[in-house]
Amino acid sequence: MRTVFDCFCGLGGLSLAAELAGLKLIGGFDADPNAVELYKNLFPGKLALQHDLLIERPKTVLRKAGIARGDVSILVGGPPCQPYSINNHQRGTDDERCGLIERYLEFVSLLRPEWLLLENVPGFAFIAGGLFLRSLFRSLQGRGYIVRHAVFDASLFGVPQRRRRLLILACRESRKVEGAVKQLADIRVKTVTVRDALGDLPSQPSSSALYCETAKTQFRQMMRKGAPIVLNAHVCSNLSERNLRRISHIPPGGNWRQIPRRLLPRGMKRAHLNDHTTRYGRLHKEKLAFTLLTKCDPHWGCFLHPVRDRVITVREAARLQSIPDRVCFGEGLTANYRLIGNAVPPLLGKGVLQILR
């Protein structure tokens, strides 16, 4: 059975994907202590390592973990996307986190895995006019790998969210890489709507509650496996009275344009009608969600519940990322929203790793 090691694992989106794909998970590492603690609880008996590769070198990490060449078949990773995201107006190679790609390459040199999978935002391909991506490809080719990349929408893999992601695949055989990319391009899973994803969760937030509908869809069955009740984290950030007045005017599928001008934030009163299309957006039950960010703030995107005048809960955000209900989050709302927004959707990862299996 092929083995998987997860670099920059976060809460474990690609590790969950590995298990869903029937692969053997070795474990993963991340610099964020909140992510590592959650990962440790989610994958008992697997390596859950806290290491900051801006400080430590991969050789040290692997020596401490007892991992050697030949132990890892598939090296996966989703390095922090903030240096490449269009939401970061200072994005670019000056961000020290871009150096984490060099560390990933050191893992490749040390482990020589059969397959490599890197996941990131589409903007990764355009940093420094594309030179950063081409440099990565030359580095992998110099290590004997054939590399291909493409942008896919996570919704095609059964994730109830419009989320375009760059996937980079590499192995030493051109035929295998070309075949994997072709299979990925042919994947078309039935669309999972917001209703499909959230309809069995209570509309009223609660720290622990019963499901309010049966798990009548395949997606719900997958999400609820191992969770007899809504275990925790079905809680959300509170909105100010001013924001509550604003969102009371927004219908399902609507956004800031439906807010009376007198109630708009000062900066948005100067906006054109074709600007900020998802700000103060409300989800529509029969459609996909928009891309989740690291905070569910209505001022930054479409994060309002389809019916209730509130933002989506941590548990609802997890569902929209295809993160199962058995994942028990910690106490901090801010940290939990961030972990979810940074995660690789497990169903996206599963679709890729099944092909590499």
Image (cartoon, rainbow, N blue to C red):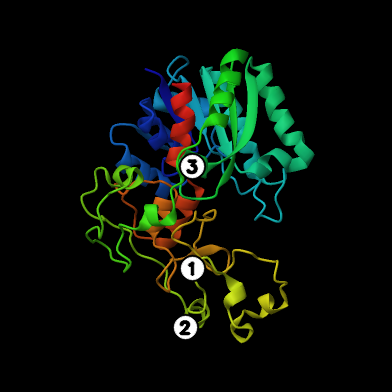
Task: Estimate the x, y position of residue 306 in percent, counting from the top left.
Answer: 43, 66
Q: Which residue is mark 2?
A: 241
Judge whether 248 appears above or below 139 on screen.
below
Q: Amino acid at mark 3?
A: Val
Tell me which label, 2 or 3, sits earlier in the chain: 2
Label 2: which secondary element: helix
Q: Which mark is residue 213?
A: none
Tell me which label, 3 or 1, sits earlier in the chain: 1
Task: Estimate the x, y position of residue 337 in percent, counting from the top left.
Answer: 45, 57
Asked whether residue 60 appears in the rendered view, the answer is no
Asked whether residue 58 appears in the rendered view, the answer is yes
Task: Estimate the x, y position of residue 18 in percent, counting from the top left.
Answer: 40, 30
Judge whether 238 appears above or below 32 on screen.
below
Q: Residues within 10 Å of mark 3 (few under 14, many from 20)?
A: many
Q: Amino acid at mark 1?
A: Pro
Q: Residue at x 61, y 20 (%)?
A: 178
Q: Which residue is mark 1?
A: 252
Q: Are the residues at dot 2 and dot 1 in contact (C-beta closer than 8 Å)?
A: no
Q: Which residue is mark 3?
A: 344
Tell me which label, 2 or 1, sits earlier in the chain: 2
Q: Quadrant of the C terminus?
A: top left
Judge whether 114 appears above or below 234 on screen.
above
Distance between the alpha carbons at the discs numbered 3 and 1: 27 Å
Q: Amino acid at mark 2?
A: Glu
